[in-house]
Image: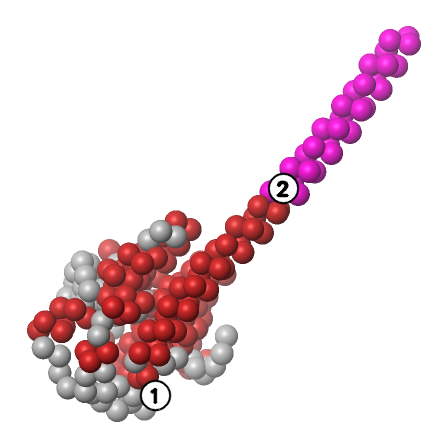
């Protein structure tokens, strides 16, 4: 009888120890997750610093990346993406033109048409941007969006000439936000368009250049509320 009591006491002790060890490992996992999240944020903050440096080089694009990020995030939420997926799309929107960092200011700010050589340089920026963020393994979806944000529905875009559904969905969302903000912003080579005119042009670009489903979600977003409002 005494032996049975001892065994039961041993079991209880073992169970208590096991539970304590389990709770300790849960705490470690939480700590690791929080360190991992902090590291991710620190990486992205550094990249944001680079994006800001890029906008400092080119006053015409000041605020462009942040506006594209905000619009892309709202569009992604409207299209049913989860909050964490929408966040990656917003981060990619923030960094989409990062690859322009190596382009000389004389080209970025050129008031007239670019030469063939200058265009070739400009067209490299999606690939250069994707390469800059490539070491961030957790941001591989974002890198893909950056790489393909200048693809077009009919395959006439760059760098890969992807068409329709072959273009990553996040890149199609960022493309709509990017085009809208570019049209409604002042550029060295043209004045900004009124919002209604910009929307008319975006609607006209649906199917051939931009994803028609995303364009109609964007138009609904604009109808429901101000697309420039902060998130
Ligand atoms: Fe771009």
Residue shown at the point (22%, 71%) measured from the top left: 103
Horizontal side of residue 38 vs 204, given as left or right: right
SS for tag 2?
helix
In the rendered image, the vertical position of residue 191 relative to residue 127, given as above or below: below
**Residue at the disc numbered 2:** 28
In the rendered image, the vertical position of residue 92 relative to residue 13, given as above or below: below
**Residue at the disc numbered 1:** 195
Choose between 59 and 65: the one closer to the eye.
59
Residue 47 in magenta? no
The tag earlier along the polypeptide, 2 or 1, is 2
Image: magenta residue range? 1-29
**Residue 25 seen in the current view:** yes
Choose between 222 and 159: the one closer to the eye.
159
Q: Residues within 10 Å of mark 2 (few under 14, many from 20)?
A: few
Horizontal side of residue 3 vs 124, given as left or right: right
User: Can you name the residue that lies furthest to the right here?
Assistant: 2
Choose between 126 and 69: the one closer to the eye.
126
* Quarter of the rendering containing residue 179: bottom left
**Residue 216 seen in the current view:** no
Residue shown at the point (49%, 59%) measured from the top left: 41
Residue shown at the point (29%, 62%) measured from the top left: 129
SS for tag 1?
helix
Image location (x, y in percent) of residue 70: 43, 73
């Amino acid at each position: 009888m005494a032996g049975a009591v001892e065994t039961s006491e041993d079991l209880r002790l073992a169970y208590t120890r096991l539970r304590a060890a389990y709770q300790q490992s849960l705490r470690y996992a939480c700590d690791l997750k929080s360190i991992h999240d902090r590291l991710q944020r620190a990486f992205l903050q550094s990249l944001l610093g680079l994006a800001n440096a890029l906008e400092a080089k080119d006053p015409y694009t000041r605020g462009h990346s942040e506006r594209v990020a905000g619009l892309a995030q709202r569009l992604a939420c409207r299209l049913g993406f989860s909050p964490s997926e929408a966040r990656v799309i917003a981060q990619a929107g923030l960094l989409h033109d990062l690859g322009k960092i190596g382009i000389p200011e004389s080209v970025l700010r050129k008031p007239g048409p670019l030469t063939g050589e200058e265009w070739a340089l400009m067209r490299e920026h999606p690939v250069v941007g994707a390469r800059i963020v490539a070491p961030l393994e957790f941001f591989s979806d974002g890198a893909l969006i950056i790489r393909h944000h200048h693809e077009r529905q009919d395959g006439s875009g760059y760098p890969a000439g992807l068409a329709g559904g072959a273009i990553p969905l996040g890149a199609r969302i960022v493309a709509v936000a990017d085009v809208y903000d570019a049209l409604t912003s002042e550029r060295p080579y043209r004045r900004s368009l009124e919002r209604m005119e910009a929307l008319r042009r975006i609607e006209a670009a649906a199917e051939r250049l931009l994803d028609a489903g995303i364009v109609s979600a964007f138009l609904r977003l604009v109808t429901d509320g101000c697309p420039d409002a902060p998130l």
